[in-house]
Amino acid sequence: MNYLKRSSCALLFAVLLVSCKQHEDARRPISQASGTFMKKSADRNKKLVANEEDVIKKIIKSNPKTKYYATRKGYWLYYDERNETDLQTPKKGDIAYFNLEIKDINGKIIYSEADLGPQTYYVDKQDIMMGLRDGIKMMHKNETVTFLFPSHIAYGYHGDNKKIGPNQSLMCTVTLRNFVPDPAANPTTTAAQTPKTTAPKTVTQAKKDTLNP
């Protein structure tokens, strides 16, 4: 009888052990799969960026008469009209006024200047395309610049949910008409700074002497 009990206990322990082992084995591939997915996603994004950059470099190579500039943010630009006399550039908090035209990487217009209308942008305080956010701060007044943006600094994998598709490189032509400091950002004049005004003194006329008019 004792032998039967011991056998039953051993069998139960073995079943529990196998069950726990299977449970652990069943859980392990989830994290492994998650890590694999992340790695594949990162590799896919790197390949996508590399392919887009290759296309842009071919465009640059096919236009040897145009001077292109590579930027530290991973996009390229060239000047349609350059202003080398006024060297000030927009800074955080300024209000920039510009016109914008957006084309696909082959030069087909997606949004014309007329479609978009005059643009007003509070520098570094509004959510706009990452490439434009950086590019506008490099411009001078009355300059026109064409930017070549890979999709990761344009509208990314989701596009703009209208005419710009997922993972689409763009050519954006910007004319910076003007930029000015934001008046609302200037501190208001304090009472200490306000010149004091003094009330005019009341001139008291001397009473006439009734005896000596």
Image: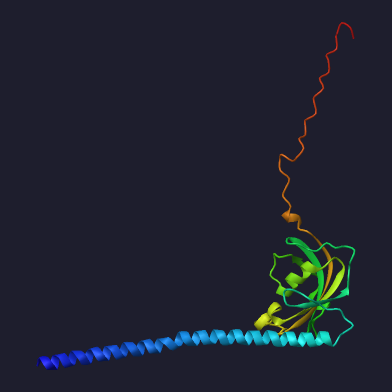
| Relative to 68, residue 48 above or below | below
Residue 87 appears at what percent x and percent y?
85, 63
Q: At x 75% / y 78%, what residue is drawn? A: 75
Horizontal and vertical percent position of residue 202 = 80, 24
Q: Residue furthest left?
A: 1
Nearest the eye: 159 or 154: 154
Picture coordinates of residue 20, whole percent (x, y): 32, 87
Horizontal and vertical percent position of residue 93:
73, 60
**Depth check, front residue: 63 or 139:** 63
Position of 178 with respect to 47 (left or right) is right
* Residue at position x 75%, y 73% in the image: 132
Q: Quadrant of residue 42?
A: bottom right
Of the 4 image quadrants, the one containing the C terminus is top right
Q: Is residue 129 visible?
A: no
- Residue drawn at 28 percent across, 88 percent down: 17
For the N terminus, the quadrant is bottom left
